[in-house]
Image (tube, rainbow, N blue to C red):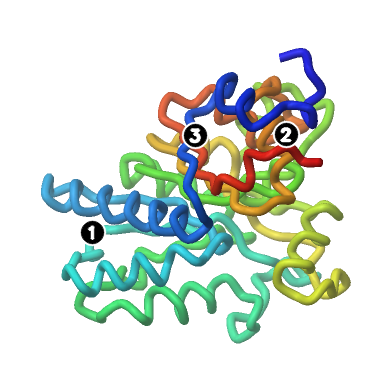
Amino acid sequence: MNKNYYEITAEELVENTKVPLLIANSAGEVHYEYAMQMIEEIVNNNNAGKKTVFICPCGPTEQYPIFARLVNRYRISLKNTWIINMDEYLTESGEWIPEDSKFSFHKWMNDYLYDVIDPELTVPKEQRIFPDPKNPEKISEIIAELGGVDMVLGGIALNGHIAFNEPEPGMSTEEFANLPTRVVELSIETKVKDAILGRGGAVDTIADKAISVGMKEILGAKKLRLSMLLDMQRAVIRKACCGEVTSECPVSFIQNHPDAMLMVSKNVIEKPF
């Protein structure tokens, strides 16, 4: 489309999208769909005697209580499931932030996912994996050993980042798509967004660095299921669905994936202003 991104109407967005869209009436419905995508993948693989390998976020998070409730209710075993977390904040010295910090993704996953699932069903501790700043290459090695990633789930930032793969203006699309798991500098857009959504606007409390699963690992997954739920994502969804594939908008790379879907609440497809 030649129109300015911000002039694209909801109807034009749906008609011209280059990425399959699942449009729900509310954020809650998207969270439920997220949980069901995970449940269906695990059940199908369990029935076939196969492993299930996810790359998962710690934001959005509202799908996890739904997922845990369904696992417990229907007695779904996660003993053959591996969850690779997308990222984690780092200290100034390049270590994971302390696990007892309320901002630790390790802590959140334990407190609100793994520990609320019945012990006989939950993911074994050795199958709960975070990228390690001391050995970032280990993620690709683990993925290769497991036979690949079944599904990536995640949210999208204002600047279009996936995990903490920030925009890299000027980088070729080929180079950007092959970025591996690595330590990254967080952009000011990411820090402001995280501060607004989770820390009452305290931007100075957000870490400067993080460890992030790379675009290479994300785009190499069999399925991508990404969500947008907030009015402030009305601009980036237009770039993701109607723009060109560019390192200036990481989410645009899902246009080239064979099984990608954006799951969005209907408020997000409305014009930005």
Disc number for residue 21: 3
**Residue 251 rendering spot, x and y as whole percentages:** 63, 36
Amino acid type, label 1: Asn
Q: Quadrant of the N terminus?
A: top right
| Marks 1 and 3, the one that precedes in the sequence | 3
Q: Residue at x 23, y 59 (%)?
A: 80
Question: Residue 80 bears which disc, if any?
Answer: 1
Residue 241, by quadrant, is top right
For marks 3 and 2 on the same chain, the one whose residue lies earlier in the sequence: 3
Viewer-closest of 61 and 81: 61
Callouts 3 and 2 close, C-beta under 8 Å: no
The three-letter code of the residue at mark 2 reads Cys
Would you say 157 lies left or right of 207 here? left
Q: Secondary structure at mark 3?
A: strand
User: How busy is the neighbourhood of tag 1: few (under 14 within 10 Å), some, or many (20 plus)?
Assistant: some
As drawn, 161 above or below 4: below
Outermost residue toward the bottom in this view: 100
Q: Give the image location of residue 259, x and y in percent.
A: 41, 30
Q: Is residue 63 left or right of residue 181?
A: left
For residue 240, the mark is none
Reply above or below: 137 against 243: below
Which residue was labeled with disc 2? 249
Image quadrant holding the C terminus, namely: top right
Q: Secondary structure at mark 1?
A: loop
Q: Position of residue 229 (x, y in %)?
A: 60, 52
